[in-house]
Amino acid sequence: MADEHYATLDLPMNEVFDWSEDKTPLRDALWNHYMDESNKNTLSTLEHMKAYKTMSDDDLKVAAGKVLQ
């Protein structure tokens, strides 16, 4: 069973954001963004991703939207 705390991260982008048609899971879209931004530095990407683990669903949507839109 999936952890409900991470349910939003597992949703496709187009279900989280009305501006997106992308079916990539939000978690993967964020990972790809931070990997590209950090020149494929996994440790840096992991540090960015840790912040999303402690956010509420609403905060996560706002923060992810700012990064990905």
Image: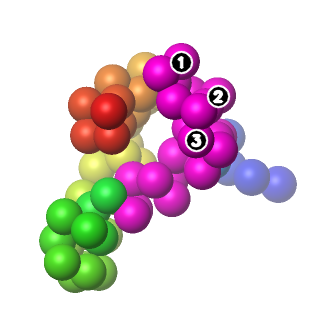
Left or right: where does residue 68 sit relative to residue 16?
Answer: left
In the rendered structure, which amino acid carries the disc numbered 1? Asp
SS state under label 2: helix
Front: mark 2 or 3: 3
Q: Which mark is residue 18?
A: 1
In the rendered structure, which amino acid carries the disc numbered 3? Asp
Count neighbours of disc 3 (C-alpha within 10 A) and say few if under 14, some if 14 to 19, many if 20 or more. Answer: few
Span colored in magenta? 11-32
What is the spatial separation of the Cα atoms under label 1 and label 3, in whole angstroms? Answer: 10 Å
**Residue identifier under label 3:** 22
Left or right: where does residue 31 sit relative to residue 27?
Answer: left
In the rendered structure, which amino acid carries the disc numbered 2? Glu
Q: Earlier in the sequence, mark 2 or mark 3?
A: 2
Q: Is residue 66 magenta?
A: no
Please tell me which residue is depicted at 53% across the width and 18% down the height of the picture.
18
**Residue identifier under label 2:** 15
Q: Quadrant of the C terminus?
A: top left
Which image quadrant for residue 45? Answer: bottom left
